[in-house]
Amino acid sequence: MKLFRKGLLLVAIPGMFELGLLGILYKSQENATRAEVWALHTKDVIIQAGEVREPVLLQSARLRAAIILNDPSGLEKNDLWDSLDKEIGELRALVGDNTEQRRRVEEIGASVREYRQWIDIQTELLKNGKRDELVAALRDPKALRLIQVIQRQLVEFIKVEENLDEQRLKAVSEARLMQNVALVIALLGAILAAALAARIFSRDVGGRLAVLTGNALKLTEGGVLAQRVGGNDEITELDKVLHEASARLRQAEDDARAYREELERHARELTAVNEDLQRQTQDNEMFIYSVSHDLRSPLVNLQGFSKELHHSVGELHDTINASDLNDGDKQRIRDIIEEDVEVSLRFIRTAVTRSAAIIDAMLRLSRVGRVEYQAQETNVDEIVARVIDAMSNTIRERQALVVSQPLPPCYGDPTAIEQIFGNLIGNAVNYLDPKRPGTVEIGVLPPDPGQPDFRIYYVRDNGLGIPADYLSKMFSAFHRLHADVAQGEGVGLALIKRIVLRHGGKIWVESVEGAGTTFYTSLPVRPVQPATQLAQGEQTHG
């Protein structure tokens, strides 16, 4: 049987018992309340009957006073009769549920009307000056009998109500006693029902729950669980789950141990690979430095010898001019020197200059990873304004419009950040389309909820644009597009990409050939943890 059904039985059996007791208690409470209401009603009737007697006596006293004073004006007032009618009406309403008492009220009303008629007759006698007849009428036993009848009727009426009052007070006492008895029985029944339910729970459920709790504790401590509890309810199912979880935990521990050993092996391999990679990086940097250093000597020699040859060509021209050769031979020698020797020397000097620039670019590219950055909160607005001011001559020559939106600060090395914006703004200005007015806009994108620690800046131009098949090469060293438009070695974007990566950010480009280009770069707004930098770098490389 499921725990829910057991719980229903444990609750239902004492609940039904308590419900019956509560019904008895409610019934006794209702009887007591009804008895009290009737007892109060009886007292209200007795009080109202007394209210009927008072106007009758007052009217009798008013008649005697009128006779004594020989003044019938007081008898002409109807206030007492009106009050008497009102009190009898209220009394009639109070006993509307009692036929016998209602009959008595009607008899009292008839007697009062008869008494009023008699009073009216006496009032007429007094008005007509027949005082002697009035006195004689007062002495008539009939006059006394009228009042006595009313009083006797009221006494009988009140006596009946008093008997009812005694009966109803007795009923109130009996109802209160029954109510107290029912309350005691309900209390004892509730205690017995609770004790019975607790006994059943402790015998059937409590013991098995204790075993289940012990198994759960052993599971958390990694111990061996006790034997499974019997039954077919939720406790049994929970215990079964605990045993299955224990088996799975043991299997998971074995798997975790194997994974840990494998991870340690991979960690050792990764350490060796990192050491080898670091060694190769150092070797590459040393190779670049060595090659650059070794290449500089022959380049210097080539540059020096080319200058000497250039001076020698001048001397050769002077020698030819001073020689005795005829003009045709002199001109032929001059043509050879100008068309072959000087052209070749010019190509040599250009190649030397280009090679020197490439060597310098290789050295700058190799040094980027070794520069120690001084990261701090950097005012990007000031940096961009400084870059634009430094390029003011070039901007005027290009007749370009450079607009910078308000730029919030970022966190990084100020010099490195200035290199980033200097390169991007410089490229945007240099590669504007001369056939139309050039514009360059520097701004920032709205915050990205997915990257709250980074801010994305952009540099947008309406220049020459980049072909779609060339976009993948934009950040590779020594790859140049539109080489005839601006000078350079083709390492600027490669340099700033490494700078951005070292700051933990990303850089990418969107362009339409002939329409313009937009470079985006994400930079941190607060110190970036190494793990974040590594993740950002992996996303950028990806």
Image (cartoon, helix red, strand yellow):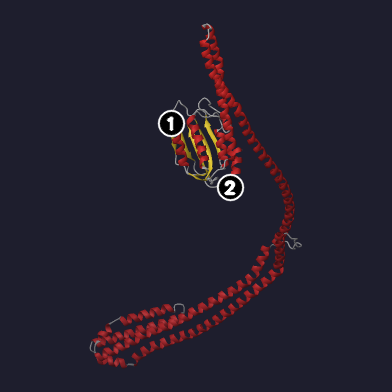
Classify 436 as above or below 446. above
Label 2 crowd (10 A; few <14 / some 14-19 / many >=20): few
Secondary structure beneath label 1: helix
* Numbered tag placed on residue 273 in the rendering: none
Classify 97 as above or below 442. below
Quadrant (top left, top right, bottom left, bottom right) of the C terminus: top right
Q: Position of residue 386 (x, y in %)?
A: 45, 38
Q: Nearer the viewer, residue 419 or 69?
A: 419
Secondary structure beneath label 2: loop
Q: Nearer the viewer, residue 12 or 2?
A: 2
Q: Position of residue 491 (x, y in %)?
A: 56, 32
Instruction: Report the amino acid beneath label 2.
Output: Gln
Residue at (66, 73) in percent of width and height: 195
Residue at mark 1? 393
Question: For this view, does 275 lie left or right of residue 466?
Answer: right
Specify the farthest residue to the right. 227
Q: Quadrant of residue 242?
A: bottom right
